[in-house]
Image (spheres, rainbow, N blue to C red):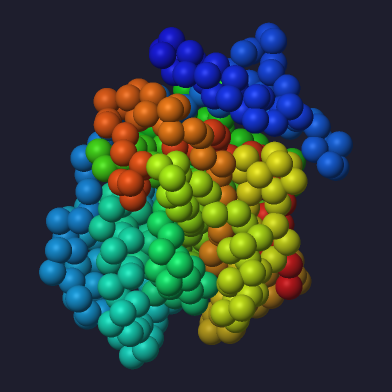
Amino acid sequence: MSDQYTEFAHLLVDELTQLDSSWIRNTAVPEVVSIKNQHHDDIKLNLTPFEVSVNDDLAGQYFKNVDSIDGLIEVYKQICDDFNFELDVTSLSVSDYASTFLNNVFINARKKMQVDDVSLIVKFIKDLDCYTAVKSIESLLYSHSDLELLRIANSQGWQTHFDHIAIRCGSSEHDSANKIAELLINNYGYNHPRIKNEDYYLFEDGWSAYPLYKILNNGQVLRIFVDQSESTHPKQIIQHWNHVYGFTAHHLALRLTTVEQGERWAIPLPKIISLMTQNGRQVLTPAGYYTKGVLSQVFTKPEKNINIPEVILNNKRAICDKLPDMLMNAKLLEIVSRKEMSRKLAEKYFNLYELDYNASTALHSAVYYHYFLPVQAAHVINSSIIV
């Protein structure tokens, strides 16, 4: 890791420990802070930013004249023709129903999507790269919660930020997640973080993940959580979700921020949850106590899909009688809040990527912690399969 990234992490550690004395500097590894939270978990965070080159793959050129649902779907299909996606370049396979599921998403969107909502979607996805734009469209046209959060942000005058997407990829028996990670690295310019223990996660309940990162020249940070079941766990849900739904994102994760007196602030999770609840969206159990709000996450209630073919459900039932009900929990929204650093450090952060920082620039969000916390990720994933 280059010295400038670790040196910057030391500044972040200085600022965070001064703001909250419950965070403790790790004297052996000065870019790491630790805290013992209210559940007595000993949490360590490495605040070193990921090291990548700025990428100019912006999807916005495709969406300049889109103002209808038909136009949005047409451009979606154009991007899918112009770029390689999972089934184009790997030997991995999914059910025939996966295509039917996605086609039905578009059919329903053509019938029900309002012009104002199309405008909100276009406003959001035009600042992404082409891969995340496609996956976000699939999510936003299906999940009522995803779209509701865009409406709330718009009505409140808040900025919506793409935080990450989770792509479920089958089983380690077929090296599934690694193949998709290689696709994203070779075709879209994503990178593994160069920090020990942040490039691969292995979970004790039978799944693993490759987190990948990218930053665009508009300041947008893109994270992709590429996960799979371990071959030793044939009942683990990820491989079965992938078989049914293909490589559509299991969830789209969004953050909201606002600018006050020249400083960018994260909108706290409880405030967002309250507004989502008022607008008829059910939110599950949040996880923010692990880090005292440096990274907070919560899932909304999954969209229920009762249209999975009976032959698939019977096959899954033969593996585990709980799988059919779990698989009916389709796509969902993850709401994220990441604590923003001070404006002074935000300027230095963007300088790492040779970008000029401007607090009033919508996408210029600079957070203390960029990565995923495995113990917290396990919590929110487990909450998504409760039936």
Q: Is residue 160 left or right of residue 278?
A: left
Q: Is residue 75 left or right of residue 231?
A: left
Give the total number of marks visible in the rendering: 0
Residue lying furthest right:
40
| Image spot of residue 181 (x, y percent) | 42, 40
The answer to which quarter of the image holds residue 31 is top right
Tell me which residue sits at (43%, 45%) in the image. 261
Residues 348 and 382: in front is: 348
Q: Quadrant of the C terminus?
A: bottom right
Tell me which residue sits at (28%, 53%) in the image. 127
Residues 333 and 12: in front is: 12
Q: Is residue 215 above or below residue 224?
A: above
The answer to which quarter of the image holds residue 110 is bottom left
Tell me which residue sits at (39%, 82%) in the image. 104
Tell me which residue sits at (33%, 46%) in the image. 360
Q: Is residue 127 above or below residue 146?
A: above
| Image spot of residue 372 (x, y percent) | 58, 40
> Does any portion of residue 66 appear in the rendered image?
yes
| Image spot of residue 59 (x, y percent) | 22, 54
Q: Is residue 288 above or below residue 308?
A: above
Q: Is residue 272 left or right of residue 25?
A: left
Q: Quadrant of the N terminus?
A: top left
